[in-house]
Image (cartoon, rainbow, N blue to C red):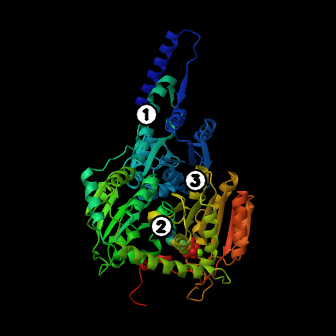
C-alpha cells in the first residue's frame, strides 16, 4: 500500500509542478487504472472484450464500451472464455475474456486451460479482491489467490498492483499469449488498481504498443534440407495438417507445398478446408489405409497426441498398442520440445509454420519427383470406394432421421455457403459431421479440439459471428448444446447470424438406455424425451423450428442463412442411431468382469 501512496503523491506533486510551469490556464489532466487498461488494449489492436460484469469490473465494461471497444456480455464466463479463445485462433491476436473475482474467475479458467492445451492465444483478465485480506485469509468478498490457481493452467500469469504498470502487464500478457506456441495467459487485476489516479502524460508514457508480438522463427537450412530429402526419397509419403497449420495463416504456401510435391494429405479436424476437402490429394476418405501404409509422414502443426494414436499402435501398423510402425516422421512445429514426445522424429523442422513451409517450398525445386504412381493409385482406389459407400448411405431417407440423412442436408448448405463458419460438438454429432460435411476454406471449422471438450458451442458461435461477420452454423449434440444453451439469449441480444442445428437423439450418445434396476430414475445417459429445444430460441425472439425430415431441415437452414436471424432447429434423430462415445469407444475403460 505504502508504495502506491508514495507513487500517487509523487505523481500529484509532479502534476502540480507541471501545472505551475504551464501557467494558470492549464487544467490538470488525470487518468486512472480503468482508462489505462482500455488504452493499453486499444493501442495493441484489441477491439473486442468477451466477458461478464460484476464487482470489481462492472465499470470497466461500461467504460470500455464508451471508449469504442466492442463488449460482448455473456450469461456464463466459461462461454465468454471459449469465445475469447477461438477469437484468438481466428485472428492471431489474443482474445480477451473479462471476469469478476473468485467464482467468475474460476468459471473462466476452464476456457483458459483449454486455450493453453489447444495453443489458442487468449488473455483471461479477472478482477480480484484486496491483496492484504486475501493473503492473510481474512475472508474478503470473493476471496481467492487467483494468480496462484491460474499459474499451472496458463502459459503465463501476471498481476498488476500499480496503475503505472498496466502497460507492462498488458504487453507481457500479449507477448506470452501469441509468441512461440500460443496459449492462455492470466492477468490478475486487484480491485484497487482500477481507480488509482495517474497523471495523464505519465500514464500515456507507461503504455506499450507491442512491436512484433509473434516474431517469425526461421527454421535452420539444414533442418529443411534434411526434411525435404527424406520426403523426396519416400515411396509412400503423407502430409498431416494440424490446427497449428490452420492458425499460421500461411494458406497459399501450404496449398502450394502439397500441390507442388504431389503428396497426399490428411487434415486434422480444424485443418479441414485449408485445402478444400474435395481436393484430389485429400486422403481423408482413406485414413485407415494411409496411416499404417505411409513410409514417411510429415506433420505440419499437428501433434502426435491421442488424436493421432500417439504415432504408434495398430493405427500406424504397429503390432501392439505401444509398438511403433515403420514410418519415419518429419515434424514441422514451433516448439522444439514437441519432437520425440511420442515416437522418434527423424527430421524436426523448428520454426513458425509460415516460415518453415515457405523454406520447404523453396527447397522443393524443379527437379522434384512426385510420389510413385502406385501409392497414389492405391489411395485413390480406397478413397473412391469409401466415397461411393458414403454417398449411398447419405442418399437413404429413413424415418426418423439418422445422423447421415440430417448431415447430408448440412453438407449441402455448407457447400452452398463456403464462407459460413461451422461450429461442431457432441460425440456422434461431432464424428459424423467431421467426416460428412466438407469444408472449402481455411479456419471455417471450429470444434472441440484437443480435449474433446463439451461446452464450446455457443461461445465459439458467438465469437465466430462477431469476429468474422459471417453466417455461423452450429451442429450440436443435444447433450453438448446443454452446456452452453443459455447463451441463446446472448445470440438474440446481439442479433447474431447463428443457426444452431441440434441433432437430438434424446441423450448422451443415444437416447434409448434404461435404468437397469427398473426404478423411476432415468438412465444417466438420457434426457427428457421429445424435448422442444427450439422453444428456448423463441423465448428470446429468435426463430425456432422442429424438424423431423431432411426436407424440413433444409428449408429451415436455407431460411436461416437467407434471413441471418438467430435460429435454432431441433432436428429429431432416431434415438437408437448413435454409438457409445462416437468413434472413440475404445477409450472407455470396461470392466473385466461382466
Ligand atoms: C466438459 C465435458 N464433459 C463431459 C464430456 C463427456 N462427453 C463426451 S461427448 C458427450 C455428449 C455426447 O452427447 P451428444 O452431445 O448428445 O452427442 P451424440 O453422441 O448424442 O450425438 C459427453 C457428455 C466431455 N467431453 N466434456
Ligand atoms: Mg445426443
Residue 81: percent from left, percent from top: 53, 54
Q: Nearer the viewer, mark 2 or mark 1?
A: 2
| Distance of label 3 from label 1 (alpha carbons) | 30 Å
Q: Residue at x 46, y 53 (%)?
A: 252
Q: Quadrant of residue 516?
A: bottom right
Label disc, if present, on residue 165 of the rendered structure:
1
Q: Are marks 3 and 2 in contact (CB under 8 Å)?
A: no
Residue 477: percent from left, percent from top: 59, 71
Label disc, if present, on residue 452 of the rendered structure:
2
Say what secondary structure mark 2 lies in: loop
Q: Which residue is mark 3?
A: 463
- Please tell me how crowded label 2 is: few (under 14), some (14-19), or many (20+) other residues with Cα within 10 Å: some
**Which numbered disc flags the more N-terminal residue, 3 or 2?**
2
Q: Residue at x 35, y 76 (%)?
A: 292
Q: Are marks 3 and 1 in contact (CB under 8 Å)?
A: no
Say what secondary structure mark 1 lies in: helix
Q: Nearer the viewer, mark 3 or mark 1?
A: 3
Residue 532 visible in this rendered orientation of the protein:
no
The answer as to whether callout 2 falls within 8 Å of ligand 1 is: yes
Choose between 1 and 55: the one closer to the eye. 55
Q: Quadrant of residue 572?
A: bottom right
| Distance of label 3 from label 2 (alpha carbons) | 19 Å
Quarter of the image for the N terminus: give it: top left
149 up-or-down from 31: above or below: below
Choose between 196 and 81: the one closer to the eye. 81
Amino acid at each position: 500500500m505504502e508504495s502506491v501512496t508514495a507513487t500517487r503523491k509523487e505523481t500529484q506533486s509532479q502534476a502540480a509542478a507541471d501545472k505551475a510551469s504551464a501557467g494558470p490556464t492549464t487544467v490538470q489532466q488525470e487518468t486512472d487504472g480503468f482508462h489505462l487498461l482500455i488504452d493499453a488494449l486499444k493501442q495493441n489492436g484489441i477491439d473486442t472484450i468477451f466477458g461478464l460484469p460484476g464487482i470489481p469490473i462492472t465499470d470497466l465494461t461500461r467504460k470500455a464500451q464508451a471508449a469504442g471497444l466492442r463488449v460482448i456480455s455473456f450469461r456464463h464466463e466459461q462461454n465468454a472464455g471459449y469465445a475469447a479463445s477461438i477469437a484468438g485462433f481466428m485472428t492471431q491476436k489474443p482474445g480477451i475474456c473479462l471476469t469478476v473475482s473468485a467464482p467468475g474467475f474460476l468459471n473462466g479458467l476452464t476456457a483458459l486451460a483449454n486455450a493453453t492445451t489447444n495453443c489458442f492465444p487468449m488473455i483471461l483478465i479477472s478482477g480480484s479482491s484486496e491483496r492484504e485480506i486475501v493473503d492473510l485469509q481474512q475472508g474478503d468478498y470473493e476471496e481467492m489467490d487467483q494468480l496462484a490457481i491460474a499459474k499451472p493452467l496458463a502459459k503465463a500469469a501476471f498481476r498488476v498492483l500499480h496503475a503505472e504498470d498496466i502497460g507492462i502487464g498488458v504487453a507481457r500478457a500479449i507477448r506470452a499469449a501469441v509468441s512461440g506456441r500460443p496459449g492462455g495467459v492470466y492477468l490478475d487485476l486487484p480491485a484497487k488498481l482500477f481507480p488509482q489516479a495517474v497523471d495523464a502524460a505519465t500514464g500515456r508514457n507507461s503504455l506499450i504498443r507491442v512491436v512484433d508480438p509473434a516474431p517469425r522463427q526461421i527454421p535452420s537450412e539444414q533442418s529443411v534440407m534434411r526434411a525435404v530429402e527424406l520426403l523426396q526419397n519416400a515411396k509412400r509419403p503423407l502430409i498431416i495438417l494440424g490446427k497449428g497449420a490452420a492458425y499460421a495463416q500461411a494458406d497459399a504456401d501450404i496449398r502450394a507445398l502439397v500441390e507442388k510435391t504431389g503428396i497426399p494429405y490428411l487434415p486434422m479436424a480444424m485443418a479441414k478446408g485449408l485445402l478444400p476437402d474435395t481436393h484430389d490429394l485429400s486422403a481423408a476418405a482413406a485414413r485407415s489405409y494411409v496411416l499404417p501404409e505411409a513410409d514417411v509422414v510429415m506433420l505440419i502443426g499437428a501433434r502426435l497426441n491421442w488424436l493421432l494414436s500417439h504415432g504408434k499402435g495398430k493405427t500406424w501398423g504397429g503390432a501392439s498398442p505401444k509398438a511403433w510402425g515403420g514410418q519415419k516422421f518429419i515434424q514441422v512445429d514451433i516448439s522444439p520440445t514437441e519432437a520425440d514426445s511420442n515416437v522418434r522424429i527423424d527430421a524436426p523442422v523448428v520454426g513458425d509454420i509460415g516460415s518453415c513451409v515457405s523454406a520447404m517450398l523453396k527447397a522443393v525445386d524443379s527437379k522434384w519427383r512426385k510420389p510413385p504412381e502406385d501409392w497414389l493409385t492405391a489411395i485413390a482406389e480406397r478413397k473412391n470406394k469409401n466415397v461411393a459407400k458414403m454417398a449411398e448411405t447419405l442418399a437413404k431417407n429413413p424415418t426418423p432421421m439418422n445422423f447421415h440423412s440430417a448431415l447430408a442436408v448440412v453438407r449441402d448448405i455448407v457447400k452452398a455457403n463456403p464462407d459460413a463458419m461451422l461450429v461442431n460438438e457432441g460425440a456422434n454429432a461431432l464424428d459424423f459431421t467431421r467426416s460428412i460435411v466438407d469444408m472449402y476454406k481455411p479456419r471455417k471449422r471450429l470444434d472441440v479440439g484437443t480435449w474433446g471438450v463439451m461446452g464450446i458451442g455457443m461461445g465459439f458461435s458467438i465469437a465466430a459471428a462477431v469476429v468474422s461477420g459471417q453466417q455461423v452454423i452450429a451442429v450440436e449434440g443435444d447433450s453438448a448444446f446443454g452446456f452452453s444453451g443459455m447463451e441463446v439469449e446472448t445470440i438474440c441480444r446481439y442479433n447474431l447470424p447463428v443457426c444452431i442445428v441440434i441433432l437430438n437423439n434424446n441423450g448422451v450418445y443415444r437416447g434409448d438406455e434404461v435404468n437397469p434396476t427398473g426404478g423411476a430414475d432415468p438412465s444417466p445417459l438420457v434426457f427428457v424425451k421429445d424435448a422442444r429445444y427450439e422453444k428456448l430460441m423463441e423465448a428470446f425472439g429468435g426463430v425456432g423450428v422442429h424438424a423431423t425430415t431432411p426436407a424440413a431441415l433444409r428449408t429451415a437452414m436455407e431460411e436461416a442463412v437467407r434471413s441471418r436471424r438467430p435460429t435454432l432447429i431441433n432436428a429429431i434423430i432416431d434415438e437408437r442411431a448413435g454409438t457409445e462415445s462416437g468413434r472413440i469407444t475404445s477409450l472407455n475403460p470396461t470392466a473385466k468382469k461382466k
